[in-house]
Every structure is written in structure tokens, then in C-alpha cells.
Amino acid sequence: MSIRSLVVVAVLAACGSSPAPGSGLGNSSTVPREAKPLPGGAAAPWIARLDQPREAARAIDELEQLGDPSAIEALGRHWSATGHPVRVLRVMIVLARPGSWDRVLPFLRTAVAMVDPATPRSVDNATVAADAIGEARLVAAFSELTELVSRSLDKKLVAAQVSAIRAIGALDTAEGTQALLAVIERPPPPHPRTATSRDQGRSLEELYALSLATTGAAINALGTLPSAQAAQTLVLAMYRTPELSTQLRRALALNGALVIDHVRAILRGTHVAVNELFTERKLDRYCGDRDKLPAAKCQPVSAKDFIAATLAGDLYDLTVVPELLEALKRPPLPYYYLEDQPGPNTQHHAIFDSLRKLGADEATAAVRAFWINPKAEVSTRTLAVATYGFLARTDKDVAALGKIAADNRADDGLRQEATSAYARIARDPKHIKLLLQLSQRYLDAAATKRKAANAAKPATKKADAALAKADKAWTDAKAKLLQVANDASSTTDQIRAATSSTKQTEDTYRTAKKKHREQTAPYRQHDQAAVAYIGYARMFQTHVARIEIAIRCQNDLRCYAASLTQTVAEAEAHVMPHIPDVAAWTREEKAGLVDAAIERAMLELARQETAASEHTPALLEHVATERRLIREAILLTLPRIAKLPCPTCVTRLDTAIAAGEGKPELGTLVIETTLVRNYFRRRGSP
């Protein structure tokens, strides 16, 4: 199993939340209900049958259905006498809900205390028991939970340990916080990439994955227990175990004000604990996967700024903007190296992304200075101009952005981001003209390539026919050879002749295939170019929707909020005066118009900040959308316009998160939704 696979397994094991009451602890048909002793002792006859081997199974089922908690002690004795079957423990837990946990508590403590990794049943019992302890918040079982969690890493035991960690978090005690901190602060085993042999690599992969699983579970549990000590431990863990950054970001987002000072200090270079960690573990440079390169060959990395900047965006706290802008002055460096190759992102990616999320007007001038400077690194200019469209409050730079967008000599990435920024701030009908001019260039180029492709089509059809003929001849020859070979009456000479004929036919086919590639190359090249040019044209044309809605709505915030219900047909109608051929677009291309218009509408609301707060319900109504651009636009806007506290925000975001569970294609959106939800949780919403 690869390191990546093991990390995924470990993270999945750590990411699960504690089971909801009534879920998975009893039969699937069991419906949680208020448990009350039944009149007349209806449970007594079935309790008596627990000692009868042939009747015990039915007795357990009947007792579960009766729901009488007075049967718990008898079931507990049966559980102890019969080797601790998990089914019995589950039934005891069902009967204990909602108010008889004291009766089952001794058995839950026993189940956790007696766990033995060599006995799968005991591990299952401990896992179920720990989940129940957490559900009922049975503080009396704390010592058994911490004892289980403190045991050595063992793949046979990890499921029970993860459940115990979740339970400790649910107890919500100061002692529990300390226990969780101890798990997170445990030194991880050596990283698998340091292995010097395949066998050692497999061993390290297993241990490292187990460490991630338990640490990740502790992070999730600690995220619900904000404290100053927890905040610092979680911040340091971002650097110790970056593989768990998703869980850590979620947890830190809940700690809010306790974290922002850490982030600011890290960016200023004055965070003592982080600086010590970097010195101790040489986290500011890459010296090979095994950390064996001489100092002269080590490469600097930007992990310190990258991680701190990422957290800054998650916190939605404008006080960190000065530190972010100061960090932008430092030269861009890769966030990490892997197998001697630099990662694709630098700390500038994280800084600009956080500035985009924060939407701070005070950052506008500094960001503008990067992209307006033609001598700056093109990668930095591209990031800056992409961010600028989310910061600018006016359209004063439309002309400068349009100039970059129209410059065929400029870097393609820079041109595209400049065009997007142009469309996010432009608000005059004359601004649409440039987009149409740029799109027309590509439409004309596409038409030229399409004409050339059509001219090459006859030759392509002829080449297709020739190849098909050669292919059929080879297929027939193979079939004939098989027939001759399977015919008992065939002579050796006949088989040899059929084999030779088949080989010649194969050679002819391969020659024909090579000739076919050469003869069809002109058509393929022209066809692919025509499709690509249409794609570029659509990009410019789709931006028209961003400007059109700004022209149509002007300063009417209700108009912008109403865009969330816009249909594809309505979007098509809105741009029809500017793009007459829009009716011929594909449905997905037309849907892109809806996305573009809504993104601009949300940006206009965000620019108004809490003056647009009355439209918060409209955004929440659509926050579960699976359209990536629309969801991102809503998430970007909510923290800026919603008045605090906003309990409805938490409720609706929770619904959106639940709707996305189990859908890998929504993974990133679910993470971002969770971060915004945690922002509202920490800002006073229940």
C-alpha cells in the first residue's frame, strides 16, 4: 500500500464523528424511544430464558423490543458469562437510552478496560462501549478511556482507540482536554519517506498511518473544546503533521480569537514555540526526503508563512491583513519538496488566497502594486490580479486590466486572470465591448481552423476507409490462421503458409496505420485548434454575464440576491443583446452564464458588507448547491454580510455539509463549507 493510501485510510478513520444516539448500536430496525419499566414485569420471563442456551438469542431480541431497562443487569451478567458477545452489549445500550445509563455504566467500563488487541471481539466491545460513553457523557469512565488511548499504536486496536478519543472529547472536561493534548503532542514515528528499504518502508507506513488516525481523532475532538492551550497545540500540529491540515484547519477555525495572535506572531517571525520547532526540525529547508543532504544542497521552503497565511483566511479576521501584506514582500519559495521536486505552490498562493477571502479594502493598493508592475514575476502578477478582482471597490482599473487581457504577447495565465478581474469590477455597457472584441478574435480563428478542417475531411475519410480495409484484412487473416491451426487435417506447410500470410497482413496493417496518422493529422490539428479557439471565445463571452448583471442591477441589492434563482433561460435572455448566437451554445455553456452572473452578484453583496445583511437568508437558501462557483461565491460572501451571531447560518451550513458527505467530487466544497460554519460557531452561534 502506498504512503498516500495509508494516509487516506488513517485520515478517514480519524475524521468520523461520534455516532448519533440510536445509530449503529442496536439492530438497524431499532427506533430510539423512551425506555420505561413495563407494568407487570413483562421482561421477567425473557430474563429467565437468558440462562437457556436454545432460548437466549430469542430472549435477547424480545428484551430489546420490550425496551425495559430493568433487564440491563441480567443482560450484563449474561454478557459476562458467555464470553462478552457484542450483540448483547449493543442491546444493553439501547435499553439504557435515554435515562438509564447508570445501569449499563459498569459493563461499559469493563468493556473498555478488558480490551485485548489479540481478541477481535474485545476490540469490538471496547469500540461500541466507548461510543456509548461519549454519547451519554459518562465522566465516571474517563480513566478507562485514557488508559485505552495511552496504549501503544496497534492496527488491531486503533478502531477502539479512535472511539475512546472521540468519547473523551464528548465528555467536555478540563482533564479530557489535557488527555487529548497529550495524544496530539506525542512524537510521531519516523516518516515513511525516510525508509531505507522496502520492508522498513512498509513498517513505517503502518505506524505512521496509525499515528495519523489517533492524532486526527484527537484534533477533531479538541476542536470542540476551545482553550488557549489547545490553540497553541493545534497551531504547532499544523507544522508537525501537515497531512492532517484539513482536520487542524477545521479545529482552529473554531478557536478563532485564540488563534489569530498565533498567526500574526508567526507571520512576524516572533512566535517562540514555532521558531523553536523550525530550528529543532529544520522545517525551513528541504534536505532530501531522508534529510541527509549536506547543508549547502538544502533548499529553502516557505512552510512557516504558507501555513500561517492559510489559517489567516480560515479565521476571517481582518486584524491579520498588515502581517499578510508584509509577508508578501518576501521572495516566493516552494511550500514543500517531494522526491527532490518543488511543490507547485509558494507562500504567495496562500497569502493572496487569504486576502481574497478576507476582502479587505486596505489590501487593495498593495495587491494592485504587484500586478500593475510589468517587471514583477509573472506568477506573482497572476496571483495578484486574480485577487484584485475580489478586493477592488471601484472600476478605476478597468482600462489597465483590459490592456493586459488584450495583449497577445502576455502570459496566457496572466491574461485570463486579468480578464476575470476586469469582469468582476466593470459596470458600464462600453466595458462589454472589449470582451466581445476579444471573443471575436477567437471565433474568427476558430472559423478559419474549421474551414481548414473541413477541407482536410475528404482526405481523412479516404484514409479512414483505407485503414478499415487493412484492419479487416488482418482480422480475416487471423481468423483463417486460427481455423487452419485448429483443423486436425491441416498440414505443417498449410499452417506455416497461413502464419506467413497473417504476418504479411499485419505488416500491411501497421504500415496503413502509420500512413493513416500522417494523412489525418491535418484534420485533427485543425479540428482541435477550432475547438480550443471556441473555448477561449466562450471564456470571454461568459464574462459578459458578470458585467451585464452589474449594469442591470446597479445598486439594487435585491436584484443581486434574486440572481440566485436565475434560470438558464433567463441568463440566456439577459446576454442575448450582446451575444446573438448564445442560443446555439451547449446547455453547459449556458449554465456557465448563470454561474458567472451569480458570482458577480455575490461579490457586489460582499462589497456592501453588513449593509447587505437582510439578504443572508437568500444566500443560505442556496448554500447547499453543488455548482462549485456558486457555492464558493456564497461562502465568500456570508462571513462578510451576515450579522452575528447567526444561528441560522450554522444550521443551514450543517445541512449543506451533511448533503455533501459521501460525494468525493464535493470534498473541497465541504471543507470550505465547514470552515465557514465553524467561523459562525465561534462567533457566538450555537
Image (cartoon, rainbow, N blue to C red):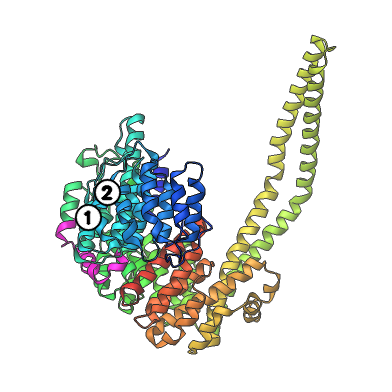
Viewer-proximal residue among 388 and 82: 82
Residue that label 1 marks? 179
Given the image, on which type of amino acid does mark 2 rest? Answer: Val
Residue at 37% over, 67% down: 675
2 relative to 453 in the view: left or right: left
Q: Which mark is residue 539?
A: none
| Residue displayed at 38% across by 44% down | 84
Which residues lie in the magenta part? 252-274
- Image quarter of residue 122: top left
In the picture of the structure, the residue carrying the numbered disc 2 is: 149
Relative depth, front residue between 579 and 152? 152
Looking at the picture, how far across and down is residue 665, in whole percent? 52, 58
Disc 2 and disc 1 in contact, CB within 8 angstroms: yes
Rendering coords of residue 562 (x, y %): 54, 83
Instruction: Inspect the image, locate mark 1, and give the three-letter code of the amino acid beneath it.
Output: Ala
Are there few (<14), some (14-19), or many (20+) residues within 10 Å of tag 1? many
Please identify the quarter of the rendering in which residue 121 is found: top left
